[in-house]
Structure formats: structure tokens, C-alpha cells
Image (cartoon, rainbow, N blue to C red):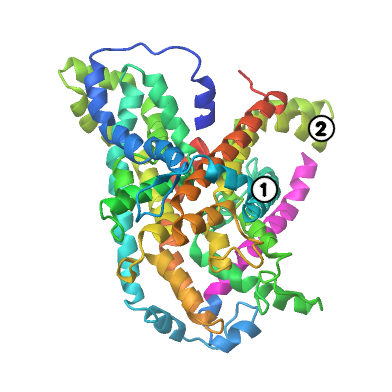
């Protein structure tokens, strides 16, 4: 017991140190985005000698259309994915958690298996399919899979949650003459808001960060989302303009950071119960 | 309970079928069934079929038998990509999990400010897969980058970590280790499940810190460790963004950051060799499945289930 008490301050010093080293590059990027370009190479510190926002205006307008378009595109895409996931995953989860249908274990096993399925394995035929129906350079190849409950991770998360709800509620409603659609909409769905919140926040962050599928499906600059635009911006600029690259990187991370601040509680819970990425 | 435990227990106990539920289940699962058909399992099968063809999206697919699979065996750039990917997975995942477990142990048991630390260590996990962080890494490990600046203070001569084929992959390994926050949170949840009385009993018996860790924490945490291991290996095999951004999409310098997924992307979406890309996709699936199977097999010897 005594050793534990003595080592506590040491522990805190250690943890603060580790945390500082880990977050230092990100803090430094934020600081550097507010510095004149030539100073970035010279200043490894966080304190600003001079403060300027030129990097932001320069980066914002560097590509045509401007960064505002990409932010809007990403926001629209994220919104579509969130709605798709909430509706389709909650429906599937209700069936897996509450209905006793033929072959349930089998289907449930397949659903669990698809959680581990890498996108790279299915991207080629998916691309062939979507390009044949003319969906390249639209958000449809990115949103429709969500409407079809292919993010099995969330189905699983919701199944877990629904299983924890008392069955007596369903039974009472059934005796009162409620069918499954009504039980789902009126009883289960209102009670599973924490699971829906977790799904929303994870869908937001993962979709916002997702690069691979957006890179493949969005090739027209007008349709670029933030990650695709940022990459194209980095590729097009010479190495000396770190300032504006950092500025736009910071802009692209702000929504993630906000989502993290608002949704921390749900993020931690979601990961702890089901093991997210 | 995790998805893995579910799979483990799926074999046990049957489900009573209620016939009247079948129709409702069909409608509730209709979107998911469509997804299975068009987005997930359907394409897995289609991918297998395309693997036997030569297909560039413009001309119709032409059957070429096992040519694509034979090419997998003789393609030396692919073999290099495999070596890079295996190195990345086998080095970064154990390091990442070691950090996650180490910090989780420090954070465990009513430490003040736990919530704050947990958030701070978790944040990189959310940022790590973004293009923005890859851009940052490009600068930090560049010739004029932050790391070399800081090394300069200690009089150490730096180098272009990303432009040097010997060290480029290491910078990506560091990046993956940097995102140890999410396995750490899973470890923390697992540590909280271990009854305090075990430690109290051990303390009475005069067990050292190491004994307690080896005889109590590690066995009781082994299912969580196993879960993290399976998950992070699968995850690491799919890394793409960071290698793509730091190498400008080339997998360079000298193919030293050529991840399997990046090679697959180049074959499929730069050269539009969809047949070969499909064969590569299937091969990747087999590799990941093999790793997972080995993990499950090895688990019998070191994972301790309390049930």
C-alpha cells in the first residue's frame, strides 16, 4: 500500500510526459500553421514569435473550388452515412436481438464475419458494379452501402444494447396488440438512444477520415471530400508551403476534435463494450 | 462481450424458432440482405470469379484460367509488398499492444485524473488514420522536419527518415504505435473486471509486483489481449492511407512503403488491371484468414477462459 502512495506522483509525471510527447507533433502543427512559412523550419517550439493567418487564407483558396466546397461535400456525405447507418443497422439489430426466425444463428454468424471483412477484398467488384450504373463521382457508392447495413460493427453494437433491455416491455406491448414494427418504433428505438449516439459519433469520425473509398469513387474536383482534396493539395504544392498544408490539415481535423469532445463518453463506452478500431 | 466471444459461443445452445417471426424478420433484415448480396458477400464471390479473368473495365472480362494466380507466385514486386506488410504488421502490432497494456496498467485502479489521461491517450487513435496526420508525419520525419530539429539540439545528425528506404517503413510503424489508445481502452475495461480480492490475497501472501502481474493480471486479461491481437492484426493488414500519402501514392522510396493494399490499389485503380487486382484481393483475404486462424489455434495454449 505504501509503495503505491509514494509512486503516485511519479506515475503522474510519467503519464503527463508520455501524453505530452504523443500530442506534441499535433500541437506543433497547430502552432506552425500560424507561423510565416520560413519560420516553420526554424521553430521546433510551440511559442509563437509572430502570429498570422495567411496560411489559412492561402490554403483555403489554393484549389478550385475552394476548401469550403470540400467541407460541405464531406458534411453531406457524413450526414448521409449517419442516417443510413442509424436506420438500417437498428432494423437489422432488432431482428437479431428480438425475433426468433429460421436460420438466425447462421445469419448472425455471417453478420459477425462481415465485421472483419476488409474493404479491399470487395472494392473491385463493387467498383465494377457502381461504375456500370454510373455512380462514379457521386456520393451514392459511399452512402448506399450504409443504407444496406453493411457496417456490421454497428449492427452488433446495437444487438448488444437491445439484449440488455428488459423483455417484459416487448411482451406487455405484444399483449396490448402491438406488432413488431410498432414495438420497434415505439419501445425499442426510444430506449436505445445511447447506442444510436455511439453509432452517430463513430460513423461521423470514420466517414470523415475515410480516404481509400473516397479516393476511388470521387475523382472530379467538384465532388472531392476533405481527405481527397487535402491529398491532392499536398501533391500539387511544392515542399516550401508547409504553412498552408498544415493550415488545411488543422481545418480538416477540427470536426474530428469537436466530435471527440462532444462524444467522448459514447466513444469510450462503444470501444470498451465491442472493441472498435 | 465482444464479437469474438459471440463467435466462440455461437456453436453452443440452439435458438427456438417462432414461425410467425419469419415475415417480420424478412422485412427488418431486407436492407441487410440486399447489402449482403450487392455490397459484401456478393462481391467477395464476384471477386473470386474476376480473379480468373483479364478485365480492364472497357472490354468485357476474358477468361484466362489461373494466370493471375500464377502471377502472384512470380511477381517480385508483390513479394516485396508482402515483406513490407508482414514487417509492418508483425513489428507494429506487438509494440502497439505493449504500449496499450503498459499505459492501461499505469492508469488502472482509481488513479486521479483517469478520465483526462484516457482521453488524451485515446485522441491519436481517432486522428491517426487521417490524411492530415500523414501530412504532418511527412514533415515531422522529413529532412528539414521536426525530429531532425530536435535531434539537432542534442548534436545528433538526422536524416530524411521518409526519403530513406531503410527508415521509411519505421516512421509508419511509429505512427501505428502512436494510435495505441483504442486497444488501451479495451484493456482498461478488461482490467476493471478483475476482482480486487485476488490482488489483496496475493498481497497477503507477499507476492511481488511481477508475480501479481504474471499470475493474476496476465491470465485474467488474456482473452482481452487475444481480442486486441486479432483485431489489430486484421486492422494493420488494411493500412493504406498513411503509406499512400507519405509516398505520394508510389509506395516509395524503392517500394519500401509498398503495403499490400497500396499495391492492390495501383494494380486495380491506376492500371485498371481488375482481374489481377481481384486475385490479389482474394489472396489478401486468405492471408488475413490464415493469420486469424493461427491466432485462434494458438489461443488454446495461452488464452485463459474463466467459463
* Up/down of B117 relative to B298, above or below: below
Q: Residue at x 58, y 50 (%)?
A: B181
**Cα distance, mark 1 to mark 2?**
33 Å
Q: Which residue is mark 1?
A: B86
* Up/down of A106 relative to A115, above or below: above
Relative depth, front residue between A177 and A217: A217
Indicate which disc residue B211 carries: 2
Q: Position of residue A264 (x, y in %)?
A: 46, 50
- Magenta-drawn segment: A1-30
Side of A208 relative to B12 (left or right): left
Could you tell me which chain the residue with mark 2 belongs to? Answer: B
Relative depth, front residue between B57 and B262: B57
Q: Main secondary structure of the magenta part?
A: helix
Q: Residue at x 72, y 56 (%)?
A: A14
Question: Can you see residue B2?
Answer: no
Side of B215 relative to A260 (left or right): right
Q: Position of residue B1 (x, y in %)?
A: 51, 29
Q: Residues within 10 Å of mark 1 (few under 14, many from 20)?
A: some
Q: Quadrant of residue B205?
A: top right
Could you tell me which chain the residue with mark 1 belongs to? Answer: B
Relative depth, front residue between B252 and A152: B252
Q: Residues within 10 Å of mark 2 (few under 14, many from 20)?
A: few
Amino acid at each position: 500500500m505504501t509503495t503505491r502512495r509514494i509512486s503516485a506522483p511519479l506515475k503522474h509525471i510519467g503519464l503527463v510526459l508520455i501524453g505530452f510527447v504523443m500530442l506534441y507533433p499535433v500541437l506543433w502543427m497547430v502552432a506552425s500553421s500560424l507561423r510565416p512559412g520560413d519560420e516553420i523550419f526554424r521553430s521546433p517550439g510551440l511559442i509563437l514569435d509572430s502570429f498570422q493567418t495567411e496560411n489559412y487564407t492561402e490554403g483555403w483558396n489554393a484549389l478550385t473550388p475552394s476548401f469550403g466546397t470540400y467541407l460541405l461535400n464531406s458534411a453531406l456525405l457524413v450526414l448521409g452515412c449517419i442516417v443510413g447507418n442509424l436506420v438500417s443497422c437498428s432494423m437489422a439489430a432488432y431482428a437479431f436481438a428480438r425475433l426468433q426466425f429460421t436460420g438466425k444463428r447462421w445469419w448472425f454468424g455471417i453478420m459477425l464475419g462481415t465485421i472483419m471483412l476488409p474493404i479491399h477484398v470487395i472494392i473491385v467488384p463493387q467498383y465494377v458494379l457502381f461504375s456500370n450504373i454510373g455512380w462514379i463521382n457521386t456520393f451514392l457508392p459511399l452512402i448506399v452501402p450504409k443504407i444496406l447495413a453493411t457496417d456490421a460493427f454497428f449492427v452488433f453494437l446495437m444487438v448488444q444494447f437491445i439484449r440488455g433491455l428488459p423483455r417484459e416491455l416487448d411482451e406487455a406491448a405484444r399483449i396490448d396488440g402491438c406488432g413488431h414494427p410498432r414495438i420497434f418504433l415505439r419501445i425499442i428505438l426510444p430506449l436505445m438512444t445511447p447506442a444510436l449516439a455511439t453509432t452517430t459519433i463513430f460513423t461521423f469520425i470514420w466517414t470523415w477520415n475515410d480516404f481509400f473509398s473516397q479516393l476511388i469513387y470521387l475523382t472530379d474536383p467538384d465532388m472531392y471530400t476533405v481527405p481527397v482534396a487535402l491529398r491532392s493539395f499536398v501533391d500539387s504544392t511544392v515542399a516550401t508551403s508547409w504553412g498552408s498544408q498544415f493550415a488545411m490539415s488543422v481545418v480538416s481535423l477540427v470536426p474530428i476534435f469537436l466530435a471527440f469532445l462532444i462524444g467522448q463518453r459514447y466513444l469510450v463506452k462503444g470501444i470498451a463494450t465491442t472493441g472498435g478500431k | 462481450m465482444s464479437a469474438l466471444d459471440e463467435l466462440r459461443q455461437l456453436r453452443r445452445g440452439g435458438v427456438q424458432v417462432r414461425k410467425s417471426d419469419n415475415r417480420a424478420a424478412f422485412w427488418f433484415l431486407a436492407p441487410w440482405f440486399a447489402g449482403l448480396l450487392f455490397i459484401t458477400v456478393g462481391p467477395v464471390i464476384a471477386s473470386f470469379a474476376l480473379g480468373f479473368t483479364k478485365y480492364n473495365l472497357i472490354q468485357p472480362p476474358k477468361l484466362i484460367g489461373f494466370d493471375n494466380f500464377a502471377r502472384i507466385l512470380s511477381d517480385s514486386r508483390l513479394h516485396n509488398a508482402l515483406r513490407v506488410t508482414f514487417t509492418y504488421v508483425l513489428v507494429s502490432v506487438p509494440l502497439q499492444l505493449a504500449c496499450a497494456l503498459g499505459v492501461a496498467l499505469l492508469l488502472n485502479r482509481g488513479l486521479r485524473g483517469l478520465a483526462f489521461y484516457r482521453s488524451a491517450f485515446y485522441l491519436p487513435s481517432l486522428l491517426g488514420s487521417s490524411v492530415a496526420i500523414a501530412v504532418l508525419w511527412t514533415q515531422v520525419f522529413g529532412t528539414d522536419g521536426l525530429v531532425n530539429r530536435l535531434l539537432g539540439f542534442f548534436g545528433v545528425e538526422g536524416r530524411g527518415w521518409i526519403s530513406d528506404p531503410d527508415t521509411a517503413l519505421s516512421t509508419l510503424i511509429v505512427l501505428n504505435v502512436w494510435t495505441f489508445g483504442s486497444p488501451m481502452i479495451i484493456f482498461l475495461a478488461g482490467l476493471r473486471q478483475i476482482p480486487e480480492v485476488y490482488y489483496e490475497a496475493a498481497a497477503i501472501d507477499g507476492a511481488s509486483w511481477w508475480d501479481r502481474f504474471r499470475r493474476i493480471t496476465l491470465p485474467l486479461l488474456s482473452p482481452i489481449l487475444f481480442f486486441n491481437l486479432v483485431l489489430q492484426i486484421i486492422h494493420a493488414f488494411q493500412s493504406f492511407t498513411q503509406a499512400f500519402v507519405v509516398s505520394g501514392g508510389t509506395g516509395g522510396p524503392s517500394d519500401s512503403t509498398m503495403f499490400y493494399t497500396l499495391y492492390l490499389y495501383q494494380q486495380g485503380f491506376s492500371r485498371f488491371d481488375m482481374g489481377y487486382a481481384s486475385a490479389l484481393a482474394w489472396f489478401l483475404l486468405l492471408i488475413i484468414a490464415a493469420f486469424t486462424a493461427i491466432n485462434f489455434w494458438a489461443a488454446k495454449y495461452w488464452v485463459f477462459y474463466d467459463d
